[in-house]
Amino acid sequence: MSGMGGQEIEQLIRLLGRLPGFGPRSARRVALYLLKEPQTRLAPLARAMERAGNAIKTCSSCGNLDTINPCHICSDPLRDQGLICVVETVGDLWALERAGVHRGVYQVLGGTLSPLAGIGPEDLDVAPLFEKLNKGTVREIILALGATVEGATTMHWLMDQLASYGGVTVSRVAQGVPMGGALDVLDDGTLAAALGARRPA
């Protein structure tokens, strides 16, 4: 790191390098871009990150990240509360919202079942989902999990748990989601096709 500035610059590069998709080279490039114009690039970014860090909340109803709790989606009276789309991560939720193909609400599991990684049912955020089901207002559950081994395992476990709720349709996203694919990297058209072509689970 010698020759790259003081300790503050080195720390900035190290922190940038921890971000998803960033390596040492890309971290240095971004740091240099920000530092070339610190007042117009670095300072506004730092202020925005601090404000977001202070304002962010986890929605107690669905697990989304927002500045209010419940989040804007769960609080929207125009959203169909009887149609719940179950996703693995907040990134998946945001991807579906970006595509504009789902007018119901969500449940973010916060992960998928993975015995090898020691992730069991107790580690998934499913309690709010069953609370909504127990109220008797849910018509359909859409399982929009990635086409991975862990996603399939989680889907089968959820289907077993949901089998006792008579009158609730359980469907899954169909065509458009490739094997091994994650929802948050798919384009809007693929997401729309997958959600629109869902089928009974």
Image (cartoon, rainbow, N blue to C red):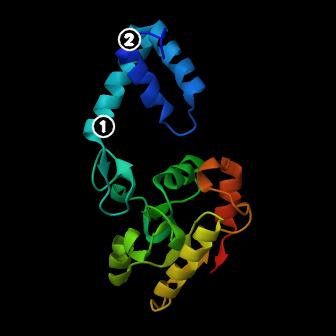
Q: Residue at x 72, y 63 (%)?
A: 179
Q: Is residue 30 left or right of residue 107?
A: right
What kind of element bears circle 1? helix
Which of marks 2 and 1 precedes in the sequence?
A: 2
When asked about the image quadrant of residue 151, the answer is bottom right
Under mark 1, the amino acid is Gly
When asked about the image quadrant of residue 153, the answer is bottom right
Are discs 1 and 2 less than 8 Å apart at CB? no
When asked about the image quadrant of residue 138, the answer is bottom left
Q: Residue at x 53, y 70 (%)?
A: 116
Q: Is residue 79 left or right of residue 182?
A: left
Q: How far apart are the two marked residues, 1 and 2, measured between alpha carbons?
A: 26 Å
Indicate the position of residue 83 as horizontal and vertical percent values.
Answer: 48, 70
Q: Nearest the camera: 111 or 168? A: 111
Q: Which mark is residue 6?
A: 2
Indicate the position of residue 126 as horizontal and vertical percent values.
Answer: 39, 72
Q: Residue at x 62, y 73 (%)?
A: 152
| Residue pointed to by mark 1 | 53
